[in-house]
Amino acid sequence: MYLGLDLGTSALKALLIDETQRPIGTASAPLSVSRPHSGWSEQDPADWIAAAERAICALRAAHPVEFGALRGIGLAGQMHGATLYDQADQALRPSILWNDTRAASEAAELDAKPVFRNLNGNIVFPGFTAPKLLWVLRHEPEIFARTAKVLLPKDALRLWLTGEHVSEMSDASGTGWLDVAARGWSEKLLSASGMTRDQMPRLVEGSAVSGELRPALRAQWGLSAPVPVAGGAGDNAAAAIGMGVLAQGQGFVSLGTSGVIFAATDAFRPKPESAVHAFCHALPGLWHQMGVILSATDALNWHARICGMTHEALDGELPETLQAPGATVFLPYLSGERTPHNDARIRGAFAGLEHATDRPALTRAVMEGVAFALADALAVLRDQGTAPERLVAVGGGTQSRRWLDIVANALELPVELPAHGDHGAALGAARLALIAATGAPPAPICTPPPIARVIEPQPAMASAFQQAHQRFRKLYQVHAANI
């Protein structure tokens, strides 16, 4: 049996599979985000461990015999989080998350140094790890002075599981400190941001063994055999492993807390001026590009909270059949934006409100706004010639057929929905565990899932969606000019 742990922003998911990749059981535990100031986003690393313990306890209770045969663990998780530890491996402060924009000025300062784009191949976004450490140096110098190790969120779980300080290339790509082409830490990038190599974890490939489960946890969970822990992957690279997205031309769209257009590439293809991410994939010798928006289901959850309803209830108020975009336009920039704008200051907005605007119209505008932001990201990949021709859909937002209709028409691409539910990143983590533990070749393991249905864009809606997308773009320009 092989266990995949996916540490998301809103929940930790655990998936247990057997050697044939048959799902045995799943469990999850919710997580909350602290926002003490505008633009801040934090979580306590202790909450991640507690969530993992709850999810694993639930899996053990539901499948005791199968869990007892555990032979490998893989990790996936939210990227970029700055999680700081002292010499005794005690967390020094809450982790500063991927959608935290407090370090915008530090990011701009680092990005102005040519060495970052030359070696890392990416804009230094405010959400990356490097500018956050520069912010800590300037605003919390006593914390910075005690920082012995900087770990990414899923690697904080690894520390709990194995006692080892280890990361892997896909997640490390988003720190700002990795030479992405060489797949290793860069002394030049570290020193340019006041860091040292000693503060970094050891790096392995995602399909390699990073360590073994600690004896105390083996005993606690009733496991007799050693359990290797795979390097794993950042959440999107892990989802790609789960979806079998490995080769040039393959890709997926993620409707998670953030939104992603993911395109596998056969080589490192940086183009930082486009605000596209160019990162290592989770398997050796592979890379990928991503267009990233910071608020996807996060935008719908915000709307649901304001309305005092669940997002499922809001979705249920919408017509079954696709409608042309209405007069109301929503900018989903609740935490700023990455692709294509690299704009940490921009915030969300509604426009085109009128007396006839009701709650379903607002819900539809939120869904359309996220879809048009994804379309802006896809347009950049198209300009570079790396955009996929079809997209597999993953993430919690895929539970809404109405939203997938909107996305397919905004992107003008077929959207494929897997047959076996949303286990993208968790399945990818479990697959990496299987590969690491058995030495199996990746290709036969990382196969695409069977597709339940394909959502095609409707030609009759093309003009209406294109016009609405242009209104969306113009609203951004006006809104950004007045900040």
Image (spheres, grey):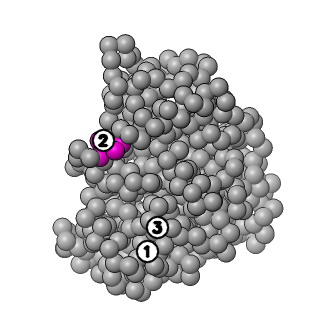
Mark 3–mark 1 contact, CB under 8 Å?
yes
Q: Quadrant of residue 341?
A: bottom left
Relative to residue 160, is residue 463 depicted above or below? above
Say whether disc 3 or disc 1 marks the residue closer to the N-terminus.
1
Pointer 1: what residue?
A: 117
Whether 310 is drawn above or below 34: the answer is above
Q: Marks 3 and 1, Cα distance to the nearest angstrom?
A: 7 Å
Q: Which residue is mark 3?
A: 272
Cβ–Cβ under 8 Å for marks 2 and 1: no
Q: Quadrant of residue 239?
A: bottom right
Q: Could you tell me if the residues under marks 3 and 2 are in contact, i.e. CB atoms within 8 Å?
A: no
Residue 28 visible: no
Q: Amino acid at mark 3?
A: Pro
Q: Is residue 157 magenta?
A: no
Mark with earlier residue (2, 1):
1
Viewer-side residue, 99 vs 26: 99
The residue wearing badge 2 is 478
